[in-house]
Image: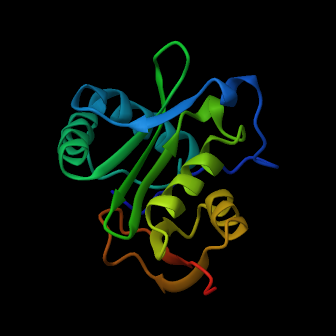
Amino acid sequence: MNRGAEADAGAGGGTDAGAGAVVLRRARAVDARAAADVWLRSFAAALPTVVRPRSDSEVRAYFRHVVERHETWVAERADGAVAGVMVLEGEELSQLYLSPELRGRGIGDRFVALAKERRADGLSLWTFQVNAPARRFYERHGFRAVEWTDGDRNEEREPDLRYEWRARSA
């Protein structure tokens, strides 16, 4: 479930009143369902041609596990609704998904900045090759493609690629 990093692939990545009202905070166990629901909506919107191998209930169970065991962050709107989720597993940015209606408002930019702050030595991530907006987003943030696969190692069996970001030496 870590190959479809959707990101904030809108033009410019600037902020507006909607993004400014969003707070990034560590996820709590009670956020797992809302984070999973963001993932489900985002995946469907960004990757309509990719076959999802897990049911909605399996995705929700997965997020209960993730929130308990990995460094998970959510983007919370002023009304308390979860609008995005980011998961760091070691040096891997394993999940970054946003509510489709909030893409392009700078929330993904803020998540990536936070990930770089939390993993200052470097990050890696996977995304599907078909996800051109996410690829442009990560490349704009200094990630470089380092490995392409035919999808034989992911659940979706979808060609993917691995990106890396390394901090520049001083």
Q: Is residue 2 above or below residue 66?
A: below
Question: At 65% from the left edge and 50% from the top edge, which residue is drawn?
Answer: 109
Residue 18 horizontal side relative to residue 113, left or right: right
- For the question of whether residue 121 can be seen, the reply is yes
Question: At 66% from the left edge and 39% from the top edge, which residue is drawn?
Answer: 103
Numbered label tally: 0
Residue 7 horizontal side relative to residue 13, left or right: left
Q: Residue furthest front?
A: 170
Quadrant where the N terminus lies? bottom left
- For the question of whether residue 6 can be seen, the reply is no
Q: Position of residue 130 (x, y in %)?
A: 58, 65
Q: Is residue 35 above or below residue 145?
A: above
Q: Position of residue 129 (x, y in %)?
A: 56, 70
Question: At 40% from the left edge and 42% from the top edge, which residue is drawn?
Answer: 73
Q: Residue furthest right?
A: 12
Q: Position of residue 100 (x, y in %)?
A: 59, 34
- Colouring of the image: rainbow
Question: At 54% from the left edge and 30% from the top edge, which residue is drawn?
Answer: 23
Q: Position of residue 170 (x, y in %)?
A: 64, 85
User: Which of the pair 1/118 is nearer the observer?
Assistant: 118
User: Which of the pair 80/43 is nearer the observer?
Assistant: 80
